[in-house]
Amino acid sequence: MSIQQLYEKVTDKWIVKAVCLGIAFLMYIFHQAAILEKKSYVIPLELLDDGNVMATSVRNQSVQVMLRARVSDIPKIDASYKSIEAYLDLTRFSVSGTEQVPVYLTLPPDILLLDPLEVRVVPENVDVILEEKAHKYVPVKPIFVGEVAYGYEENLVSVVPNSVYISGPKSIIDGITEIETEGIDISNKDESFSKNITLVNTNKLVTLKAPSSLSVYVGLEPVRKVVSFTNIPIMIVGLKSNLRIANNIPQTVASVDIAGDVLVLDSLNSSRIQARLDFSRIDSAGEYDIPVNIFIPTNARLADKERKTIHVVIENIPVKPVTTESSELSDKEEAEENTKEG
């Protein structure tokens, strides 16, 4: 058969032949529709961003995956659809900007082996805003809740480790200067303590690479202050019986500054403070600068270490002369006493 004869056979009654072909195709479509069923599943969209950029905004957080298979195969798909993965591959991008990124699917073997199988994903491309990655170390800032017990204060706070590695979009990382901890309760604490802590990340675009264990040490110590006590009476001690003070000296100490713990000084009053002039080493008349000795409870100390002195003039006490009349009277009294004894 020549080419001409073949062409004539094909074109002979071609309209009828075309109609028959169309009818056959429609019958195939209807047949496939009769034996195939469509199921749709919503699959979370994952990001593969191990490269130089990351997504700061993704229009879709999930995609719709539509599968067509034999009615008898639908139960297999229902049992395995949770293993379907949908992701955006961002590793092929290297600069910031807005891109349309195609959606890739990974189907489990139980679904891939089905025949026939039709797969469609909506949308096929997703708009993504990309930004250059950045990373750095920033200090850890402990956050305290409450107040320590009255009379105490924090004197040392130590976090181990004291810094943490963060990564994320450059515009965000550049603005982060520290990472805060969870609230650390110090209410009514009156002694130092340690505890394990966790970090607080308020931005889901920022990744913290912290060690598995973080701890904080809070050192507490008593609050110290200085209190002034006024008009403390001066006591005279050790003055020999044959000596006396000849000049006017102060009767009180105008002011005594005492340092110590708040809890100690709050209960201290002037009655427990003594000021003394000690003359025990003075044996003769003269002029002396006598230091004022201040005596306070052992759990406090003098804030002013410079000892005050008072200028004192010491003189002998005159001895009264014994008269003749007095001597005779004494002899008479002695004689009478002897007579009584006899």
Image (spheres, helix red, strand yellow):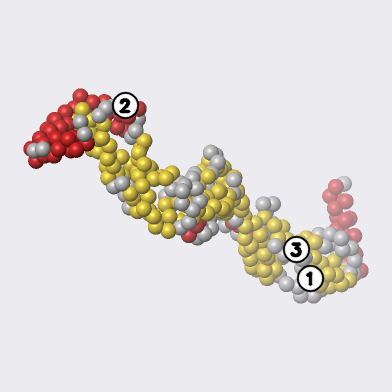
**Does residue 194 show up?**
yes
Mark 1 vs mark 2: which is more N-terminal?
2
Mark 3 vs mark 2: which is more N-terminal?
2
Q: Quadrant of residue 257?
A: bottom right
Q: Residue at x 8, y 38 (%)?
A: 13
Which amino acid, by three-letter code, is at mark 3? Lys
Q: Which mark is residue 310?
A: 1
Which amino acid, by three-letter code, is at mark 2? Leu
Most foreground residue, 153 or 342: 153
Q: Quadrant of the N terminus?
A: top left
Most foreground residue, 8 or 131: 8
Q: Which residue is mark 3?
A: 305
Would you place residue 124 above or below residue 245 in this image? above
Which amino acid, by three-letter code, is at mark 1? Ile
Q: Residue at x 87, y 60 (%)?
A: 281
Q: Contact, CB < 8 Å: mark 3 with mark 2? A: no
Residue 256: image x %, image y %?
68, 65
Q: Residue at x 56, y 48 (%)?
A: 164
Q: Quadrant of residue 317?
A: bottom right
Residue 231: image x %, image y %?
65, 68
Q: Which residue is mark 2?
A: 113
Q: Is residue 266 left or right of residue 68?
A: right
